[in-house]
Image (tube, rainbow, N blue to C red):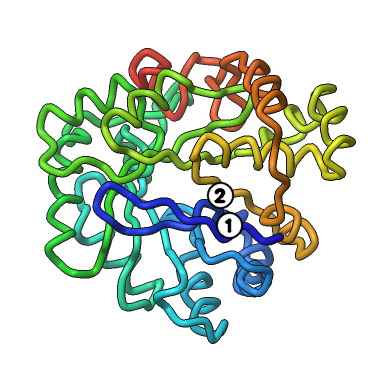
Amino acid sequence: MVVTRKLTLNNGVEIPIIGTGAWAPSDPESQGRVTGWILSALKNGFRHIDTARGYLTEKAVGQAVRESGIPREEIFITTKLPWGDHNRVRESFEESFNDLGLDYIDLYLIHWPQYIDDNNSHNPDGTWRTIDSTNFNESWAEVEKLLDTGKVRSIGVSNFSIKTLDQLFKTAKVTPAVNQVEMHPYLAQNDLRAYCKEKGIAITAYTPSGYSIVRNDPLLIELSKKYGCTPNQLTLAWHLTRDTIIVPKSENPERQKENINLPTLDPEDIEKISKLDRNQRICNKADANGQVYGWTYEQLGW
């Protein structure tokens, strides 16, 4: 059965608990397929699309929404401020707004806390080059102003930790509605979940299945037999028991159906899956220099 459940954000806006990610490789062929598979996702029941300026897919997402024939108010659109635009929030937002070509954006996130100049993104030694001239407190103040435009309903952050959220709250006038982070059974982030719950911040999990690294866990393979589903469905269902929004991405129509048709788990199995936590990052882990896009785990608060 298609999951149609919604969560209510701290500003009263409702968000479908399952969305489809809208990342695609930057090559023209991959980008050219986006509208088609987003339309497929909408046909298969998805009503939440998670894109970003950095994904280059905003135009395709907007086109799919318009072609779908589904009323705009029934579809939730998330997009994000790229790391290179911390110094030009309003301009970047307007570019996203225009490329989507929709009347409004449902949720706008700061994609990363660090600021990287895309035109000069690396140091001579090959490491990522971050810029301190604008910090995320200043960026967030500009994001807050976007609410006055009437073009965005909710604002939030991505890849923020307890440490960076604490720093944000030193100046924030608006509490983020959402914090989107990597989360899966191997990276349960229980301390961050508790912190965000206390602050009224919903969590969206990217890489919610943990890729094949998590899906091939013997426990998940065994439990999937009990429920007559795939390990992927089992993992996604686990997230829902934790009131976590998820944005799995697939271009394949059958996998899309799998991602939104999920079993109901028994309490003892939820507990077993939760015990798989090992604080293991899979999607965004430190490189050979001990950094994630120019910041150390200590700077990120990870």
Circle 2 Cα neighbour tier, 10 Å, few/some/many (<14 / 14–19 / ≥20): many
Report which residue position mark 2 lands on. Answer: 247
Judging depth in this view, the residue of 229 and 95 nearest the camera is 229
Q: x and y percent of residue 187 in the render?
A: 57, 23
Q: x and y percent of residue 193 in the render?
A: 42, 27
Kindly identify the residue that appears in the image at 12 percent across and 55 percent down: 145
Q: x and y percent of residue 234 in the render?
A: 73, 38
Q: x and y percent of residue 68 in the render?
A: 57, 82
The answer to whether marks 1 and 2 mark residues whose Cβ atoms lie closer than 8 Å is: yes
Q: Is residue 271 left or right of residue 114?
A: right
User: Could you tell me the amino acid type at mark 1?
Assistant: Thr
Judging depth in this view, the residue of 63 and 103 nearest the camera is 103
Judging depth in this view, the residue of 16 and 269 nearest the camera is 269
Circle 1 Cα neighbour tier, 10 Å, few/some/many (<14 / 14–19 / ≥20): many
Label whose residue precedes the other's in the sequence (1 or 2) = 1
Q: Quadrant of the N terminus?
A: bottom right
SS at mark 1 in the image = strand
Q: Residue furthest front?
A: 267
SS at mark 2 in the image = loop
User: Could you tell me the amino acid type at mark 2?
Assistant: Val
Q: Is residue 283 above or below residue 195?
A: below
Report which residue position mark 1 lands on. Answer: 20
